[in-house]
Image (tube, rainbow, N blue to C red):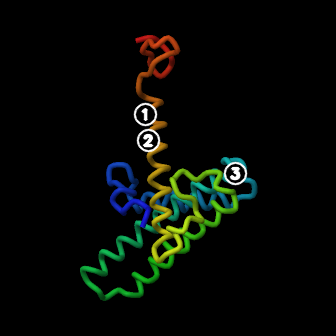
Amino acid sequence: MSGPDYEAAYPEADTPELVDEFIRLFFWQQELATPGAARDRGGDEATREFLLRDAAARDREGHRHELLWLREPFALESLTNAQALADTAARDLQTHDLITREAFVNGALGPSAREWKIAGGPRAYVRQEYRAWRDAALEHEQAQTLPGRDDAGEIVDVYGRHL
């Protein structure tokens, strides 16, 4: 499978706690249900970020249930439900990316790539996209806080002041 593995996609240091993420997503979903809210918040790009973060949270929850089931295989219904929710959220993200003609896709392989057409493929697509989105966000954050160089090559702070 071409997507990153679970640990590479969701490193503990850079990934919000699952409960915190579900709470954020709940309130975000309530906000998006308000007429015009998606447009006000950034339109398709904001909707895509919501779908990505929701799919990633559900993928993480599905993975948590898979690990629990491996240790104590008694909650098969819970595992099946978590996997179904993760699969559905992953397919919703892929569908959105296809409808928007991959305008916000960050990973190397688009949503229609053959690598995602196997069992577990849609969830691997989510991992690819979440990792690429997270890496871009961290890079942007660092660019906002680290010194850089101006056109003349002089070192400047984030406000353009010479150091």
Q: In this view, does 123 lie to the left or right of 37?
A: left
Estimate the x, y position of residue 102 in percent, counting from the top left.
Answer: 64, 55
Residue in front for this viewpoint, 130 or 75: 130
Amino acid of disc 2: Leu
Picture quadrant where residue 20 is located: bottom left
Picture residue at 26% right of the left edge, 83% below the top: 72
Question: Badge 2: few (under 14), some or many (20 or more) residues near its Cα, within 10 Å?
Answer: few
The residue mark sitting in front, 3 or 2, is: 2
53 vs 92: above or below: above
Question: Badge 3: few (under 14), some or many (20 or more) residues near its Cα, within 10 Å?
Answer: few
Picture quadrant where residue 76 is located: bottom left
Mark 1: which secondary structure? helix
In this figure, which residue is indicated by the disc labeled 2?
Answer: 138
Mark 2: which secondary structure? helix
Mark 1 and 2 residues: CB-CB less than 8 Å, in contact? Answer: yes
139 vs 44: above or below: above
Q: Which residue lies furthest to the front in this view?
A: 114
In this figure, which residue is indicated by the disc labeled 3?
Answer: 43
Mark sitting on residue 59: none
Quarter of the figure with the N terminus: bottom left
Q: Is residue 79 left or right of residue 31?
A: left
Q: Distance between the residues labelled 3 and 1?
A: 26 Å
